[in-house]
Image: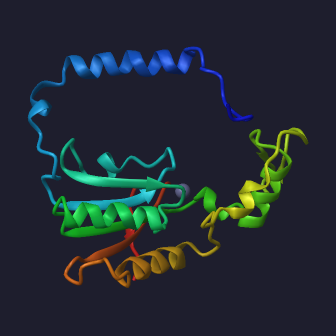
Amino acid sequence: MMANRHSEPKPTKIYDEVMHANHGYAESFGDKANLALPPARGFAILTCMDARLDPAKYAGLAEGDAHVIRNAGGRASDDAIRSLVISHKLLGTKEWFVIHHTDCGMELFDGPTMAGLLETSRATASFDGTSWTNPQSEGGSPDGWHVAWLTFKDLAQSVRDDVARIRNHPLTPKDVPVWGFIYDVKSGQLLPVE
Ligand SMILES: [Zn+2]
């Protein structure tokens, strides 16, 4: 047994809320049972996991329409590119959108800060607007030093960098347009990045 292994969690209030919501969703699932696996509208979005972003709403998606690949920052990580390549090569998407956003948490720290925090403690840190503080100084791990956290300081440049990385990747087909956008969390608008 691994030293760090979690015990099986007990159902929580959040767990119950999710299951309750799902029961309602499944009851009115209707003809979504007949959706095809390949996305019907033939495109993919790479965007941030930020809870304020709802790609289905900001880009007008219904179930079955498009691939949405999300991670912290909406970064073009190796794993995001893996998903995009599968999206096109096996599931036929023909356009890709990279959508970062204003007020992204990835601008609030850097890799060494994150690794240093984790080395001291894995518990949730707090941010005072300037710096991060651990709630305790035990239960840390040095493994954070081996993760590329993919933070950024310049939002527009982060979009340009990721669009360029995807366009220049050897597995990206030349005829797939890769669009770069910033989503404004104050207005809901998608702003093109040149
Ligand atoms: Zn974000």
Q: Position of residue 177 (x, y in %)?
A: 25, 77
Instruction: Write the residue at 78% across / 50% down.
Output: 118
Instruction: Write the residue at 24% across / 50% down.
Output: 60
Q: Position of residue 108 (x, y in %)?
A: 69, 60
Q: Quadrant of the C terminus?
A: bottom left
User: Quick one: which residue is furthest to the front in this view?
Assistant: 1
Q: Quadrant of the N terminus?
A: top right
Q: Position of residue 39 (x, y in %)?
A: 17, 52
Instruction: Write the residue at 50% across / 44% down.
Output: 51
Q: As displayed, is residue 71 above or below residue 110?
A: above
> What colour-coding does the image apply?
rainbow
**Any part of residue 110 in sight:** no
User: Quick one: which residue is furthest to the right in this view?
Assistant: 137
Q: Quadrant of ligand 1?
A: bottom right
Q: As displayed, is residue 159 above or below residue 35?
A: below
Q: Quadrant of residue 45?
A: bottom left
Left or right of 151, for residue 11: left
**Any part of residue 68 in sight:** yes
Q: How many marks?
A: 0
Q: Quadrant of residue 139?
A: top right
Q: Nearer the viewer, residue 110 or 57?
A: 110
Q: As displayed, is residue 173 above or below residue 104?
A: below
Left or right of 131, for residue 78: left
Q: Nearer the viewer, residue 36 or 50?
A: 36
Left or right of 93, for residue 151: right
Q: Position of residue 169 (x, y in %)?
A: 38, 81
Left or right of 73, for residue 44: left
